[in-house]
Amino acid sequence: MSIVHQIGLTLIPGVGQATAKHLLAYFGSAEAIFKATVPDLLTVYGVGAAIANQIVSQQVLNQAEAEQRYIEKHDIKVLFYTDADYPQRLKECGDSPVLLYYKGHANLNHPRMISVVGTRMATAYGKQLCKELAETLKPYDVLVVSGLAYGIDIAAHRESLRQDIPTVGVLGHGLDRIYPYHHKQIAQDMIERGGLLTEFPINTMPDRENFPKRNRIIAGLTDATLVVEATIKGGALITAELANSYHRDVYAFPGRVNDIYSQGCNFMIKTHRAALINDPKDLLYYMGWDDVMKKQAPVQQQLPLGLSPEESRVLESLKAAPLLIDELSARSDIPQSKLAIHLLNLEMQGLLLSMPGKRYKLH
């Protein structure tokens, strides 16, 4: 399959992620798209005459060839939407990029991945939390994702490297530059023990509009997003909202009520957009990573004694996967008015976890 055609698909003016995926679904490959006729192209949803003519002209392939020469020279890998090594968590998101550029050695389908985000104006409190988080995560084989920005992002990357934790930075520009430039050395270290990832081709500047796009990758790439410090407005809350929209877990450290850099975290906790993290060990508890012995040979799970029939049905219903409360009510055949009491009892016994968005899972 031609990398040039894959890159070219992302360079066609007017073709976004949804249209590109419609084209792929219809023609089967990027190469087949560029061999299609205008009448065939016009049958695809979202493709008009302007786009069809752009594809048939194949003008974008010249730029794609220049991109290919650059990535081959600089050991950059192309991850296309249909590739087996494309990040599978990200692929579950409807607006995931059709193509990613990756420079690094970390596995982007690592079994345990979290995103750490926060304000660019990190305080000593936030930096200390990043340090404690990395120290806590070290024994648990976790990959940390962030955005290489000032503040909490770079603190999360730096502390991860200090603990020899693989860490990946998601960029809002091409891999021919590092922004901010001050982070060039740590970015180089991350390539050796993690990686740098972007959807943007070379010569893409770190323009403001690129960073919300970058944030959706940070949110979609991992199992959970942790907000360390955040103002009431900013990229960290955007990332957290995106993670919630992808039905991913979101957590936040609280802060003082009059601290501007904790207002965002406190707001998310108050409005049930994020679960409260008092200590980094809470993250291990929520994610079910607090007992490393769980990785040993599986044993037949048995329901605890002394449960009511309704409580037993709740736990049985959650064996396959986490459920929203309305799904759990339907699955267990228990009205929500009664279900809430059973959920509270089971949570107090440490048998299940309450997640953001009224989701529940077995502990």
Image (spheres, rainbow, N blue to C red):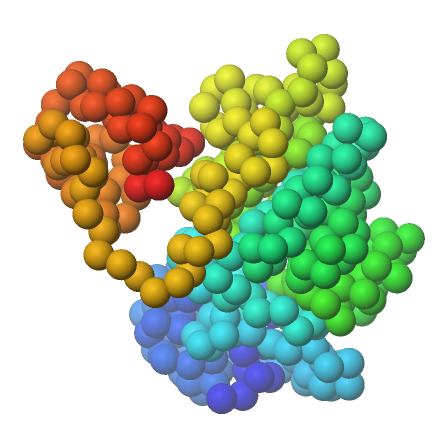
The percent coordinates of residue 10 (x first, y second) are 57, 69
Quadrant of image for the C terminus = top left
| Residue drawn at 74 percent across, 42 percent down | 131
Q: Is 143 drawn above or below residue 360 in the view shown?
A: below
| Residue drawn at 21 percent across, 23 percent down | 342
> Is 309 left, or right, of 135 in this rendering?
left
The percent coordinates of residue 94 (x first, y second) are 41, 54
Whether residue 223 is visible:
yes
The percent coordinates of residue 23 (x first, y second) are 40, 71
User: How many labels sit on residues?
Assistant: 0
**Residue ranking furthest to the right:** 182
| Residue drawn at 41 percent across, 77 percent down | 38
**Residue ranking furthest to the top:** 258
Q: Is 76 drawn above or below residue 180 in the view shown?
A: below
Whether residue 57 is visible:
no
Q: Is 338 drawn above or below residue 293 in the view shown?
A: above
Q: Is 122 drawn above or below residue 263 in the view shown?
A: below
> Is 82 left, or right, of 302 in this rendering?
right
The answer to which quarter of the image holds residue 121 is: top right
The percent coordinates of residue 243 (x first, y second) are 49, 42
